[in-house]
Amino acid sequence: MTLNEFVSAFAAEFDSTPEEVFKPETKYRELEEWSSLVALSIISMVDDEMDKQLTGSDLRNAGTIENLYNIIQAK
């Protein structure tokens, strides 16, 4: 999965945030819709789509979508 594909898949986990808000440099934890439920959805999406195990710590340590993508790629 490329970075742009990851950004699109990441955006799809949000219900009301417009997709154009999501860019590699987006600080996702600052989004109004960000919640523990969305975090669980992201973890599940990464497991299903990328076959990688993402942790809550990974989500807390990544500042942007691109940082998170890089953490996942390093696994």
Image: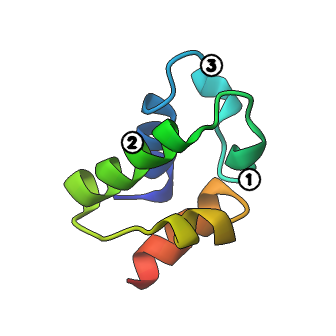
Can you tell which mark lies on residue 25?
1
The residue lying toward the viewer, choosing from 20 and 14, is 14
Secondary structure state at the residue bearing disc 1: loop
Q: Residues within 10 Å of mark 3 (few under 14, many from 20)?
A: few
Q: Which mark is residue 57?
A: none
The image shows residue 49 at horizontal and vertical percentages of 24, 53
Please name the residue that numbered disc 3 is placed on: 18
Which comes before the other along the chain, label 1 or label 2?
1
Q: Nearer the viewer, mark 3 or mark 2?
A: 2
Query: Residue 33: percent from the left, percent from the top?
Result: 65, 28
Looking at the image, residue 16 lies above or below residue 5: above
Which percent across, then down, holds residue 70? 54, 73
Label 1 – label 3 distance at C-alpha: 15 Å
User: Of the residues shown, which amino acid type is indicated by label 1?
Assistant: Glu
Q: Which residue is mark 2?
A: 41
Q: Quadrant of the C terminus?
A: bottom left
Residue 53 appears left or right of 13: left
Measured as percent of width and height from the top left, residue 3 is found at 49, 57
Q: CA distance from mark 1 to mark 2?
A: 20 Å
Task: Count how many numbered circles sit on residues in the image.
Answer: 3
Q: Secondary structure at mark 3?
A: loop
Kind of residue at badge 3: Pro
- Which residue does the image show at 58% across and 25% down from the upper left? 19
Q: Label 2 neighbourhood size at 10 Å, few (<14), some (14-19), many (20+)?
A: some
